[in-house]
Amino acid sequence: MKKLILGLAVTASSLAFAQQTPSSSSNPVTFGVKGGMNVSSLSKDEGLDDQKSKIGFNAGVFANIPIAESFSVQPEVLYSQYGEKSEYRLGNTNYSASTKLDYITVPVMFQYNLIPNLYVEAGPEFGFMVSAKNKFKNESNGNSTTSDNYKDRLQTFNFGVGLGAGYYFTPNLGITARYVAGVTDIFKENSGDAVRNNTFQVGLAYKFK
């Protein structure tokens, strides 16, 4: 809870700074909404024969705050789905599993405009877990089960580093792409290699002007 409050405080402070930052016709502070697709995976676990990416979504709001002629900082608050798919074999039976990890994420991206409509970005992402579920399927007979929320076994806080780019087709509408590499282990107790979130995001952003 303290980490969630801290992350939201960082975002609130950034938004308050945005409202107080002097604007000009060429570099106004802007607010917007964004959303898109996540293609997520976890760092390789021992004992899984084949890991596959899991499709999810992200959606939320952002503020873009110019801090220099070609530089800006963009804090965001997103609902983001992470996880993975995997396949394994027990005896003569093939199984598949899908892990769904839902977070409220707070990326803080530092952006540099290569040209007025094209930018690159990098920055930290703070994540706060909402839920965690597994779905198992017997590929032989098609039976499947979904686990209860097991977030108590996982870290509620997740930290990652994002790298990305974006292009605005119009002053309001743009396409975005970002890769977020997890830094923290998602498990509270893990005697083996750390398991981290990794995701590629692509979507649309709309600025209100």
Image: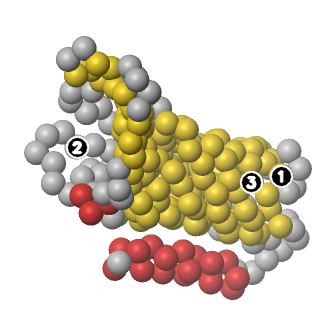
Q: Nearer the viewer, residue 172 or 142?
A: 142
Picture coordinates of residue 148, whole percent (x, y) = 35, 56
Question: Which callout, 1 or 3, points at the residue further toward the start of the chain?
Answer: 1
Could you give the CA–CA distance between mark 2 and mark 1, rounded to whole angstroms? Answer: 38 Å
The mark nearer the N terminus, 2 or 1, is 1
Q: Are the residues tagged 1 and 3 within 8 Å (C-beta)?
A: yes
Q: Quadrant of residue 200?
A: top right
Give the alpha-carbon distance from disc 2 to disc 3, as whole Å: 33 Å
> Residue 7's spot in the image, x, y percent?
45, 73
Q: Secondary structure at mark 3?
A: strand
Residue plotted at (18% across, 39% down): 193
Q: Which residue is mark 3?
A: 205
Please, which colouring scheme is shown?
Answer: secondary structure
Q: Is residue 140 above or below residue 205?
A: above
Furthest residue toward top? 92
**Identity, as a three-letter code, of the amino acid under mark 1:** Leu
Is 192 situated left or right of 155 in this image? left
Q: Left of 57 or right of it: where is 143?
A: left
Where is mark 1, residue-wise?
173
Determine the image quadrant of residue 42: top left
Q: Which residue is mark 2?
A: 194
The residue sitting at 74% across, 48% down in the picture is 204
Q: Label 3 is placed on what type of residue?
A: Ala
The image quadrant of residue 175 is top right
